[in-house]
Image: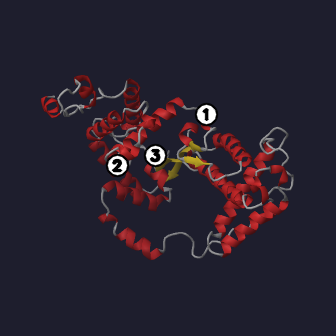
Amino acid sequence: WRKARSAAPGLDARAWEQAEPPVAASGQVSLRRLPPLVAVQVLFGLWRRTTDGAKTAETTLRVACRALAGQQVATIGDCDISRVPGENARALIRVLARHVRLAVTGPESEQARDLWDLGVFGHRGRIDFTGITQPWLRECAKRWAAQDLPRHRGRGSCEVRNAVNAVARLSETLSLRPGRGDRPAELTRRDIEGFLNRLGYLESAGTISRYRRNSICRGARTVLDGIRVLGLDRPGQPAAGLPADVVISVADIPARAEPGEPGRDLPAEIMQVLCAALGDLEPGGFRTAVQVAIDTGRRPEEIVSLPLDCLTRDRDGKAVLVYDNRKAARDRRRLPVSEDTAAVITAQQARVTARFAGTPPGELALLPTPLRNP
């Protein structure tokens, strides 16, 4: 204060107190300069982040709070991220703001937006509707997505996102016709044919693959069929008057390309090199993951999500791996494994138990991540 007053005689003490960053103290982060609502939002976001098992460095939180205080924002969502120093602090403010927004947002209000945060619907990621330029088609895609999302689990929301992206491709074609496709009653079968022909051209030019072309056709067909099922083509609805022939039939969808030979398995010579070098893979958890993948053929997401007590025995004393089939949403599946695989898992269990000796075994994972272990 003495230095500030000597540099600027007549400086208001109260204004200086509000603008001056607090003295950093080890183990402490001051929220004193934050507006009351922003302070609550920071604490709430930090609590949710910690509940999820994420670590937050005090230095990062201190930088984030100083940036919020310096901008004097009304809410954490108003913060100008570009003015926050340090990528870690910027990322932290984004996470805190997202937790706050999810706490006060419901599916109904999220559906009014053109960019959905799927966390509101219990999924990961986002769905972007901005690529659909026709208002009626965008509204139809939103209503279809809202009723289809609850049918999916895990990463099944990717199917909804892919279908919306396919409709965005259809929207690009419709925007080239007279009227830009803004009036659904004016569309004809020729518009669908133009869309299909354009996809064929893109494949021939090497811009998209046969698999991608097939996927776009299927996604657009799903949403167009959904418009009929949901009655969105009735009077008073967004697609009112949409002609019955504006559809994509099964015959319109090109067959998928035959998989090349050999299959997608790793060649035998590569497997030999990998198996010979297993002893050199570090750390031990990574080596365990690769060995279990080789021995069981389980998907990576199924292996990394194994709990500590994933190994059991059947009535005959044979080793059995208990895992969750994330893709098909079938939990507690049982897979017989060899004694060699059981020994690998048992050794990893011992390493994890020794590392987290103070944590109940029921809360431990077989392959703990270095980032989310409070």
Give 207 or 21, whichever is nearer the viewer. Answer: 21
Question: Residues under labels 2 and 1: Cα distance?
Answer: 30 Å
- The image quadrant where one finds the C terminus is top left
> Can residue 250 be seen at all in this image of the molecule?
no
Rendered position, 212 above or below 4:
below
Give the residue type that dot 1 points to: Ser
User: Do the residues under discs 3 and 2 have CB atoms within 8 angstroms?
Assistant: no
Could you tell me residue 345's position as x and y percent? 38, 51
Using the rendered view, name the quadrant where residue 197 is placed.
bottom right
Question: Which-is-in-front pick, marks 3 and 1?
Answer: 1
Could you tell me residue 91's position as x and y percent? 38, 45
Give 15 or 73, whichever is nearer the viewer. Answer: 15
> Can residue 213 be seen at all in this image of the molecule?
yes
Could you tell me residue 65's position as x and y percent? 32, 35
Give the residue type that dot 3 points to: Arg
Give the residue type that dot 2 points to: Glu
Give 182 or 309, whichever is nearer the viewer. Answer: 182
Query: Between disc 3 and disc 1, whose residue precedes?
Result: 1
Q: Which mark is residue 109?
A: 1
- The image quadrant where one finds the N terminus is top left
Pointer 2 residue: 87
Q: Which mark is residue 195?
A: none
Using the rendered view, name the quadrant where residue 192 is placed.
bottom right
User: Do the residues under discs 2 and 1 have CB atoms within 8 angstroms?
Assistant: no
Query: Between disc 2 and disc 1, whose residue precedes?
Result: 2
Pointer 3 residue: 313
| Residue drawn at the location 71% of the way across and 46% of the way down | 135
Mark 2 packing: few (<14 Cα in 10 Å), some, or many (20+)?
A: few
- The secondary structure type at the circle numbered 1 is helix
- The secondary structure type at the circle numbered 2 is helix
